Amino acid sequence: MTTTQRTDARLNRERLLATAREVFAEAGPGASLNEIASRAGVGPGTLYRHFPNRTALLAAVLRDRIEALCAHAEDLLASESADEALAQWLRAFLAHARVSQGIGSALMVGSAGELGLDCHRRILGAAAGLLTRAQRQGTARTDLTADDLLQLVIGIALSTARPEDAGQPDRLLALVLDATQAVPRRSAPLPDVVRSSGAR
């Protein structure tokens, strides 16, 4: 394979991954693979050369999202405020958990279960780094663990999956963030809950 072919193949893979992230977020893990290929500007054959089946594509999308979250955590470790860095990353993790829960469920079969364990270990490490830094600065309570935080945020994601729950995730996360502080303080009101017109 020539250098040009290798470059084209890499760009096609990147386009397919970026498009798959969008389409799976819109339509869930059962989204049409032909639609993904079409929106990425390639043929189905190109998609299947890079990702031989749906599971391979879902796993690649999940890995890509985890890479982005871990890189974000690394960047935040250099920020001045450990407290705000932790809060910012937990907001990003909540968004990830809400979008990715269908992918995670679809992958928790067979050998893909190991991927889920590896992703959890990496996310746990990212959360631990940010939490430990906040604890050392005296802004986060010392009896809190990274696993506590992840379980709380995942719980928010799982319990607010309905369209009518639009504002509830931010409201619940605000409560969690307040509870993580060494000296809890609430300087602003909780975010409003936004209900859809069809909610009762």
Image: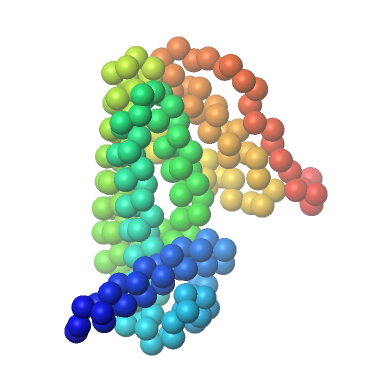
Q: Residue at x 52, y 75 (%)?
A: 39
Which residue, as the protein is rendered here, is positioned at the far front?
Answer: 4
Q: Residue at x 80, y 49 (%)?
A: 197
Q: In this rendering, would 33 be left or right of 78?
A: right
In percent of width and height, residue 151 lies at 41, 39
Residue 140, image x and y in percent? 38, 20
Splitting the image into 4 quarters, where does residue 71 fall?
top left
For this rendering, which residue is in front, 110 or 172? 172
Front-most of residues 1 and 152? 1
* Image position of 127 with respect to 179: above or below: below
Q: Position of residue 14 (x, y in %)?
A: 36, 68
Q: On the rendered image, what quadrant is the C terminus found in?
A: top right
Q: How is the image coloured?
A: rainbow
Position of 77 with respect to 193 (left or right) is left
Left or right of 113 in this view: 97: right
Residue 159 versus residue 169: which sits nearer the camera?
169
The answer, for residue 120, to whether it is visible in the render is yes
State which quarter of the image contains the N terminus.
Answer: bottom left
